[in-house]
Amino acid sequence: MFKYKCLNPIAKIGLNNFTEQYQAVDNIDDADGVLVRSANMNEMMFSENLLAIARAGAGVNNIPCDRCADEGIVVFNTPGANANGVKEMVIAAMLIASRDIIGGVEWVRANAGDPEIAKLTEKTKKKFAGTEIAGKKLGIIGLGAIGVRVANAARNLGMEVYGYDPYLSVDAAWSLSSDVKHVTNVDDIYSKCDIITIHVPALDNTKGMVNAEAIAKMKKGVIILNLARDILCNETDILSGINSGKIRKYVTDFPNTVTAGHDGCIVIPHLGASTEESEDNCAIKAVIQMKDYLENGNIVNAVNMPRCEMGICTLPRITIIHKNVAGMIGQFTNVMGNAGYNIANMVNKSKGDYAYTMIDVESSISDDLVKECEKIDGVIRVRVVRKDV
């Protein structure tokens, strides 16, 4: 029996993927797996029972991923599950920034009681006139699951699209419209584009990447969209750009005291992935990935461990999370051989400082074998997925 804890409400359609082998628990210390959306886990201490955390969404800033790796806890996320919802919000953001739709709607609301509102509308609407997005140059920084969808949708809307991503994956490249101009220098995005949208993770080299230096390279009247992570833009520099007239509009999905209510800022209350469809997709993907790890030992879409798969577990299987150092595989196989075990299948993958090894054997796994593996220097966690033949 596997036990799981939900730290946030998780869509029922996702939880329905749990079978009778799974039991929801109230105490996180009893859980083998945790499902989370926005709850902050950074200060939490974890019991030795916890094997996996699955984030129903892409961002994992609320999870101490490095500490989890050191404790042998695999952290999953669900990239791409909410991509369509965010893509649609980006298209909406471009439209409301290019045309003062919000200002117009607010004017109508304010004048709703005026019997002459129809006549006043014809005199006033010029205040809210904007520009069309067709024919404009859109720059996309980050061509992952969301960026590619935005690029393709923008091309269909008649925009000229430039994309920048030094780590463009093969899958993304295949999905990207051939009409998108792939640039190798982000400065080309800054200098050429009328609208710039950011879709990169929050890393040390991306925090505050849109700053005064970047803004200085942009066209006058540029529109900047940030529906990815709040810390990607230096918002003090953004406001300076708005006040100087360099930036026409800044649309962000992350309200704070710097931008909320400021002229030139359209601040959305973090709605990018807040659709029923996105929440359902994220929940389904998170549960399926957690189940595959708990039941088979397979790791897919982990942020702190390598991708490593060996199919459905049909033989006794032992998995080992360990440091990515030389000689580990030899030590594992020596322990197996000395204990009389014949290895039927084995796979090892590494990512940064950590590695993961899966081994199927042809006889039942003893407690002594587990203890011998645990004694090896650099081993973080040994887990038996299936004990007996």
Image (cartoon, rainbow, N blue to C red):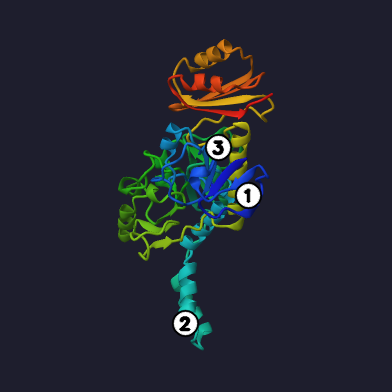
The residue indicated by pointer 1 is 14
* Amino acid type, residue under disc 1 in the picture: Gly
Q: CA distance from mark 2 to mark 1?
A: 45 Å
* Amino acid type, residue under disc 2 in the picture: Asn
The mark that comes first in sequence, 1 or 3, is 1
Say which mark, if any, is on residue 144: none
Q: For residue 387, what is the image quadrant?
A: top right
The residue indicated by pointer 3 is 301
Which-is-in-front pick, marks 1 and 3? 1
* Amino acid type, residue under disc 3 in the picture: Asn
Residue 241 image point, x, y percent: 32, 55
Q: For residue 367, what is the image quadrant?
A: top right
The residue indicated by pointer 2 is 111
Q: Relative to residue 165, is residue 328 depicted above or below?
A: above
Identify the residue shown where x is 65% and y is 52%.
Answer: 13
Residue 172 image point, x, y percent: 57, 38
Quadrant of the image for the N terminus?
top right
Q: Nearer the viewer, residue 153 or 370?
A: 370
Element under disc 2 = loop
For disc 3, the neighbor class at 10 Å (few under 14, some 14 to 19, many from 20) is many
